[in-house]
Amino acid sequence: MSSHTTTIDPELRTALKQLKLGRIIDTLPERLVLAIKGKMSYQELLLLVLRDEIDRRDSTATARRAHDAGLDPDMVLERWDGSAKVTFDQKVLGELMCLRFLETRRNVVILGPVGVGKTFLATTLGHVACRHRFQVQLTRADDMLRRLKQSRLDNSRDALMTQLSTIDLLIIDDFALEPMTRDESRDIYQLFVERNGRASTVITSNRDSSEWIAAFDDVLLAQSAIDRFFNNAYDLVVEGESYRPRLKPTVTGNEQPPAAPITKPDRPIRRRRR
């Protein structure tokens, strides 16, 4: 293949846009140069350009799923600080990252003291699931219970419970921090029962599983729900120092402080006569 220019013909631009392939224009000149230097055939160039578009669309769709799921974009495994004084079973995490627990509809319990990175690890699982086209939702336990309470007032509870029960991966953060009311206990029981064996749930908590029962209003209801959940769950126990100081923003030496705003005096300054 030979060519003397990498300028994109206007008619080609129009055709690509009509086919909703306009983003190809951004990288096409570089791809043409690469094709000329590599003496690619027309088919090889076409395949290269189309693969770029497929990768771009996959990346965009993944980012959209992660955004809709409420996942922090910075909490990905690539940004986990391996020097943190935090310990957990690497084999268990490796198994979870393979997402077999999603395929087999198992649950995950991430336990540990405040600040050791439980939410970070749960969020990384969410990001990996989004990359593999699973539908994910992350919610704090108190926020989820508040939404369920509100749904009773506007008669949308059935729709909300269906949504929570059927999503591929539901991540519930900070579970069992506070005692639950009778209605909240029933909501959690129903959610655990309906998701059990049908979809995967990840729960993070500062409290050991033995303390979860005390958070329910009804002990029998609690035992039934928790027994179902834990007997179908992987355990990931995180111990060590707080991870949060590593997330604290800092100012590097290269950054310049913002200039002080220049304000005009309310009235002219008069010099004193000597």
Image: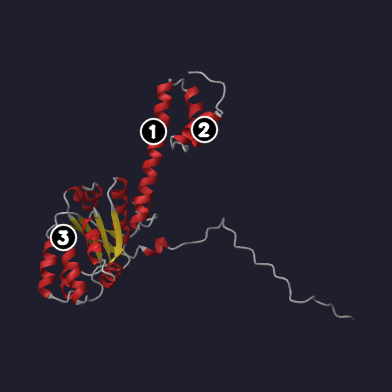
Q: CA distance from mark 3 to mark 1?
A: 40 Å
Front: mark 3 or 2: 2
x and y percentages locating residue 4 in the rendered image:
57, 21
Which amino acid, mark 1? Arg
Q: Which residue is mark 1?
A: 51
x and y percentages locating residue 146 in the rendered image:
29, 71
Q: Classify 24 as above or below 162.
A: above
Which residue sits at x=46%, y=20%? 39
Which residue sits at x=38%, y=38%? 55
Tell which circle, 3 or 1, labels the residue nearer the N-terminal end: 1
Front: mark 3 or 1: 3
Q: Nearer the viewer, residue 77 or 85?
A: 77
Q: Secondary structure at mark 2?
A: helix
Q: Which residue is mark 2?
A: 13
Which quadrant of the view contains residue 253? Answer: bottom right
Q: Is residue 59 left or right of residue 214?
A: right
Whether residue 229 is visible, yes or no, is: no
Q: Classify 262 as above or below 55.
A: below
Q: Secondary structure at mark 1?
A: helix
Which amino acid, mark 2? Arg
x and y percentages locating residue 147 in the rendered image:
29, 68
Q: Mark 3: give few (<14), some (14-19) or many (20+) Cα within 10 Å.
A: some
Residue lying at the far top in this picture: please name it: 1
Give the image's coloring scheme: secondary structure
Q: CA distance from mark 3 to mark 2?
A: 51 Å
**Label 3 with label 1: CB-CB less than 8 Å:** no
Which quadrant of the view contains residue 42? Answer: top left
Q: Which residue is mark 3?
A: 194
Which quadrant of the view contains residue 263? Answer: bottom right
x and y percentages locating residue 140 in the rendered image:
30, 66
Which residue sits at x=16%, y=49%? 104
